[in-house]
Amino acid sequence: MLKCTINGKEVEVKEGTTIIEAYKEMQEDIAHYCWHPGLSIAGVCRLCVVEIEGNPRLQIACNTEVRDGMVISNVSDKVEEAVRWGLDFHLINHPLDCPICDQAGECGLQEQYMKYGQYDSSMAENKVKKRKVVDLGPKIVLDAERCILCSRCVRFTEEISKTNELGIFNRGDHSMIGTVKDKPLDNDYSVNTVDICPVGALTSKDFRFQQRVWYLENTATTCPGCSTGCSVSVYHNKEGAYRVKPREDKENNGYWMCDEGRNVYKFVNKEARLLSAKTLNSGKLSSVRLAQALEDFTSFNREGKKVGVLLTGQNTTEEYKAILEMFAGADFFHWKNNEEKFNDFDGLLKRGDKNPNTNGLIETISNLKDAKSFNASNYDLTVAVMPENFLVYEDYNEKLESLKASKNLLLFSAAKLPKMELKTENTWVFPLKTFVEKEGSYLNHAKTERRIQKATSIVTEAVALNEFAAAVSRGLKININHHESRKQNEFTNIPGQY
Amino acid sequence: MEVKLLTEHYDDKSFQGIEGYKAKGGYEVLKKAFKMKPQEIIDEVKASGLRGRGGAGFPTGMKWGFLPKNDETRYLLCNADEGEPGTFKDRKMMERAPHQLIEGMIISSFAINSPKSYIYIRGEYNESTAILRKAIDEAYAAGMLGKNIMGSGFDHDLDLYVGAGAYICGEETGMISSLEGKKGQPKLKPPFPAVQGYLSKPTIVNNVETLAAVKYIIRDGAEAYKKHGTEKSCGTKLFSVSGNVQKPCTVEVPLGYSLMDLIELCGGLKPGRKLKAVIPGGSSAPVLTAEECVDAKMDYEDLAAKGSMLGSGAVIIIDDSNCMVDLLNVIMHFYHHESCGQCTPCREGTGWLEKMVKRIVTGEGRLDDIDLVLKVANQMKGRTICALSDAAALPAISFVEKFKKEFEYFVREGKSMVTSKGAPAHA
């Protein structure tokens, strides 16, 4: 361990720690644009300057290692002047189009300007003109004038996605990020470049112009897109969820997530959802109040009935436990999509098992049978839990169709259902909560517990399986927590906004 | 007086070819070097006090000493990307005495145990390139390059790499990036090239003149070499003298030579003209006023004491027919054009400086601009990966501080103070 003094405070750091890492460790403010903990050091923005006792020249904190006894400061007048000018150099050719910029509210330039800003521009000359709406690929748009050429995105494609689509073209103040002909920015991780872009230069086609970021809350949770279970933040407001961004998690996903995982917010919003419970009424499914449907189901005598339960790896372990208890003695079937790809891994984050909790299901319910052998007509009561991310289930419609053979059907679905002609005796359909509306845990590919947390309520009539089971066992006393306030614990603190 | 060490045979056309070169004792020093131990050569170079002739003036022997003491492959890179405005000494050396450079490189490579060296030559130097190529072929044919050179057991290959015209590739790590096939941009230091350079291997980058001087240090010994020059600035130096002298040329004089004598050596000023200023070490060196020139000595220490630098030895003589605002405009245009764009202060600052100076030159300047030029330039100094930002800032600061009246006049009157020239041609 090395001892050093940072802004007057004595700290101990590991050998090989850079000054900027030491600042981050002790949560001391330090301005920077090009440095990112997940990327190599570029040392080009020159904003992280610090004064080291005994050295007349300011040094950059990102490329200087702490040495024993070093006395470091970034609160001296000299440093502040350098940062102020460093910021001004970043801004003189920046278009300052914050009112129409999607990054406004979460922009590195705005943040530093509030702290170091000089509040009037000393440059009387015309700004350098660059290209404005450059289509870099299917998911990303570049505004070259906003770009501060920190090279984070270029380093990302070199070092993380290893796809090398991006480069800096030209020289000096006409330098511009770009791609070469016939090789657009299109890889499985491309949208990370938008996250790490400290300004509004790279924007995601999916999110741009959808919402002002200050109208969105974010909730720390886990991506349900595959068995990796990346730590993510879901950004949402009363209307629904708008985007998913990765959250720093050194052991699991580092600083990144895949582009596919970013789409998981799409199946949680109202337009994709089943909004109310339904029961069978003279051969037709019709909407009823949740309480009504529950009462209806509870009055059904399950005594001595043969029950078959169809489950996927898309629910929480807590839900599996509740369903196992509720239907003790039933046959449980595991419905898998692309099972032959379950062990696929792209070497970075993406896994072939597109369910977040296959392991949780397997560990919770022993004697799982393969859903290929499931035949609804063998049972008096069929319980089917449809996957919330149904797009990854190629046989989704086929399975739904096969449920028609049920004698009695208890169906849970988060997604909107197609019109169904049913010849069952009884059918109860309950809208299911998605990962943003409930709490619980997944067991990922490495059998590590991954927590999910309630972000918002989108479908007010939706239930989680454990809530359903509790309500039924309590005898209709529905206690479905839709409106509890979000707990502020360490889990909700979002570390590492770089 | 001139001391012709490196330039002794410049006027002999046959010196360009290997036969003529050998007739004048060529490759004899290499033979001598092979009889020495590599460390002895390094010690001799250290003892000679030779400092890098490319601009930074770093002690050559010390640089070689930074190489790791292990078996890792190492490279020698000859910096022939002579791009500093005002400098043309290396070009002349490559054209008049190419084998002298090659011999110096083989000796140096032997000293640092490098199996492969490159000459990175400036893209515009077509003639030098052709002559060097021929010389390298001759050296291979004569067994001076390749396997088991002169029966010494030392193998060495030498390649020529032609740059694409970027000034920044003259910066040693920019050159390494370019040679690696990447965009010519300086690399963040540490690690330094001697530890991790070309292809991440230990690499020594030396200037053409430095490597040629090594030959003469080995030929005559460090003591003999040190007899030239001053105590701290040892040896001779090639100066590219240009601007308002009657005979612009390359001359070799001992370090510590008087600047005024150097001007006389180049034929002096045109009749009727008065000395106004001198840029003593290439366009990035702070300008000296005529008063400062009177007792200026052309060595590292004296010029540093005067707030300027010896740089690459490009001496630009400016007489009273020149407008300093106009000159600064030209210099600022150059650095704006050549900034690689990596570091923000340089990328944005060089453009800003040019725009401000250009505005003054076109008669649109504001009085505030003069101070702003100083402020901006001061904030560009020492803030970037390489020295290009300083190279732009230093002339800006020195021109404005030392010739402030001319700048103020231009802003006030909208025209140059230098009446004989009138409005600048490209204003």
Image: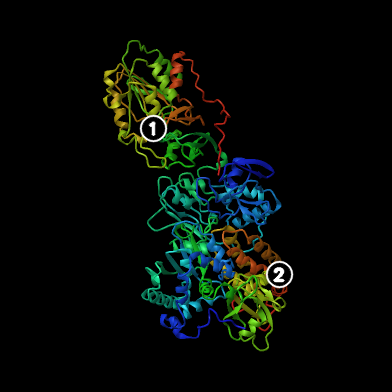
Q: Is residue B336 visible?
A: no
Residue at the bottom extreme of this rendering: B271
Indicate the chain on which mark 2 is placed. Answer: B
Question: Is A345 situated left or right of A152 in this image?
Answer: left
Q: Residue B134, how many percent across, how many down? A: 40, 77
Residue at image point 42% right, 53% down? A164
- Where disc 2 sits, the SS reads helix
Q: Is residue B338 visible?
A: yes
Indicate the chain on which mark 1 is placed. Answer: A
Along the viewing direction, whichever of A488 and B384 lies nearer the viewer: B384
Tell me: residue B48, above or below residue A133: below
- Residue labelled with disc 2: B401
- Residue labelled with disc 1: A355
Q: Residue B290, how many percent across, how many down? A: 70, 78
Residue at image point 46% right, 21% down? A467
Q: Residue A159, how many percent across, how many down? A: 45, 49
What is the tally of numbered marks visible in this picture? Answer: 2
